Image: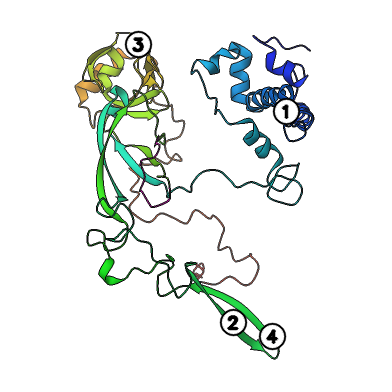
Amino acid sequence: MSKHVADTEYYDRLGISPSASQNEIKKAYRNMAMKFHPDKNQGDPDAAEKFKECSEAYEILSDEEKRDMYDRHGPNVFKEGGGGRSGMPADEIFRHFFGGDFFGGGGDPFGNSYRSPGKKKTKDIHQELRLPLNVLYEGGKRDLPIQKHVLCQTCAGNGTNSKKSYVCKTCNGSGVRVFIRQFGPGMITKQQAQCDNCMGTGESIPDRDICKSCSGRKVIPTTKIIHLDIDKGIMEGKKIILRGESSEAPGALPGDVIIVIREEPNTVFKRDGVHLLMEKKVPLVNALTGFKFLITHLDNREILVDIPPGDILKPNAARQIRNEGMPYYTRPYQHGNLFIKFKIKFPKQLNTQQMQAIRNALPDLQSAPVVKDPIIVETAKVSDIDFQQPQLNTNYGGNDESDDEGHTGQQVRCAQQ
């Protein structure tokens, strides 16, 4: 069955149809990449261009989300900043596809060795941001202090006054020491441990040249205030990633600050996705005859709710107000619904006059049963259940004497007459 797409250029580059599966896409790219790889076609600019084109097509079509955007909008959606192209070079895509050990070494299928590009990164900082429900509803701004390390400005992250580098003589800069231990006749083993002279840094700075600002640590602690824009309708658990805002370290790129949104409980509303839930206690007379009440919403608007006469509320009845729930995240002009669950408050007692008025007003009054022989009919009195008092054992028959032997504990026996 053919698949309708807005553009077929990327499919044509790999020689496949728009309905191709992921396995077919991978197979096609493998064949094309091996055929047009520049190392196999040295001096052929046309092959290099073909290799670049098929790698670009594979980058988009191998990702389901990017492929869906391409099928619906064509290649311009990536050129105009609409979604998600990584811009990875063709040779990097090739290495990611085949892996670094294609022929048992750290290179590509044609024997070229390479190192993984880029510097190492410092650890990411994870932090929670607790927000009240009204902020998640309305959006807003928040300032969040982040504790991190930055390069020492005095020594420029070198740790010394002279800006010199000192290699630890104990471990020769490796940061570890190797020990050879014998654990049996003719049996030895090598063990590694952190160098106790440089504490694993590989450097040993003389006391006279240690930077006084950072004490030779190369970094100093600091607190940075990050200004955050909170979008309307943002969800509990949503992660806000601030690229390159983590701690600094010599020879490394700063990692990311990852902020996780946490929702604080609200005394009136409870969130359920894009909907809001609340409970309303209603006296019995209002539940039977109708009433009006006000709701102060999360943005301080007052909403008048009208339960008209004749709309009888039963215990745990629920009503909804459309479009008064939470905003949709990324679509704040759309809202979910507000659901109201009613708790009916019954009177604690009624006098004789009130009871008679209710009997006269309400239909389906159940009359007392006719007792044929009052002498043999027992009258039972009921009482409230006190859940604080111990109740009878609900395991009926659990201590029956006819059970198998082996029971422990006391058993109740009937007293003999």
Is the N terminus in the top left, top right, bottom left or bottom right quadrant? top right
Residue labelled with disc 4: 187
Q: Amino acid at mark 1?
A: Gln
User: Can residue 346 be seen from the camera position used here?
Assistant: no
Q: For the magenta stretch, what is the residue range?
A: 241-252
Give me the disc on residue 311: 3
Question: Residue at the location (33% across, 48% down)?
Answer: 386
Check if residue 383 falls in the magenta segment.
no
Label 3 vs 2, first from the N-terminus: 2
- CA gap between label 1 and label 2 equals 52 Å
Q: Judge whether residue 371 can be spotted in this image.
A: yes
Q: Could you classify mark 1 by the number of other residues whose Cα lies within 10 Å: few (under 14), some (14-19), or many (20 or more)? A: few
**Separation of marks 3 and 1 at Cα, in angstroms:** 57 Å
Q: Earlier in the sequence, mark 3 or mark 4?
A: 4
Q: Residues within 10 Å of mark 4 (few under 14, many from 20)?
A: few
Estimate the x, y position of residue 112 in percent, counting from the top left: 70, 44
